[in-house]
Image: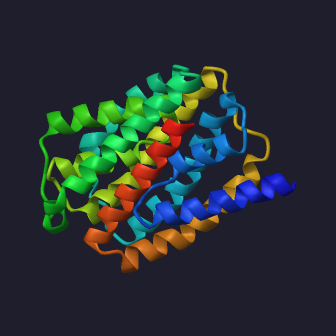
Amino acid sequence: MDHALLVTALVGGVSLFYATVGQAGGTAFLAIMAFALFPAAEMRATALLLNILVAAYATWRLHQGATLEWHLLAKFTPPSLVTAFLGGLLVVEGRAYFALTGLLLVLAAGLMLLRRTADTVGNGDVRLAPAATAGAGVGFVSGLTGVGGGVFLTPLVIVLGSTSPRHAAALAPPFILCNSALALLGVLLAGQRPAEGTSFYALGALAGAVLGTAFGQRWMSQRATRIVLAAILLVAGVRLLLR
């Protein structure tokens, strides 16, 4: 039980930190499970379940605040649902899995740090073809890795110049929710199952999301959102590479 309580506390802490920038925390959930020596076959399904819970709460809060750009989200999400399911069906094990996920997160961090002009970008638009292509790619990676996809979507939306960091972060929760649900279906069909005690971890994740979402919506500036997100991506990516 002590082990479960420690993992629950860590999950709650990273959920709070990630929620300030609109992320569910799938990458950190995976890192915690790796540190706690969870079986590899349980990690992806557990992370996706936690993603679904946290993203569902964040999506509800954003919808209540009328801050979601549904028209922009609709261009990225539909293609990602199919590819997220297909990615979930595939099983990448061992060092190859951690290397792939870590490299993608480090790349995303670099894009965020280089995109300084995004701090003053207003709400814009992006053509359907690039958005659908990006969504499909992110969906596949999210299903393959179990991170939900928000950490990949947000930098892409900013780099495409379609909106500011804060609005891009607001797109992540509903995108994560949809992709994690389809990815989890594929993962379950592939024979992987969540870890025992996931209900405890879910309570910690939800508590962190409640606090982190409130903090991020009220006090995070555009520049702070970009820098914090980049730091999260970089640390998580290096952590997985070293794993």
Horizontal arrangement in the rendering, residue 122 relative to residue 218 (left or right): left
Q: Is any atom of residue 240 visible in this view?
A: yes
Q: How is the image coloured?
A: rainbow
The answer to whether 159 appears left or right of 188 in the picture is left
Q: Where, quadrant-wise, is the C terminus in this rendering?
A: top right
Q: Position of residue 30 (x, y in %)?
A: 59, 43
Left or right of residue 119: residue 148: right
Q: Image quadrant of residue 204?
A: bottom right
Residue at horizontal 64%, vertical 57%?
11
Residue drawn 39% across the image and 79% down it = 218
Q: Quadrant of the N terminus?
A: bottom right
| Residue that protrudes farthest toward the front in the picture | 242
Residue drawn at (25%, 48%), measured in percent from left and top?
111
Instruction: Establish if 96 lies above or below 141.
Output: above
Choose between 237 and 126: the one closer to the eye: 237
203 over 64 or under it: above or below: above
Residue 81 in view (yes/no): no
Residue that protrudes farthest toward the bottom in the picture: 219
Q: What residue appears at the point 21 percent right and 39 percent down from the top-left corner?
A: 131
Q: Where's residue 79, x and y in %?
A: 31, 31
Name the residue nearer the viewer: 144 or 53: 144
How far across and how far down the image is residue 116, in percent? 17, 61
Count of numbered circles on the image: 0
* Residue 81, position as x, y percentages in the image: 40, 33
> Is residue 68 or residue 104 the one in the foreground?
104
Direction from residue 86 to residue 224 in the image, left or right: left
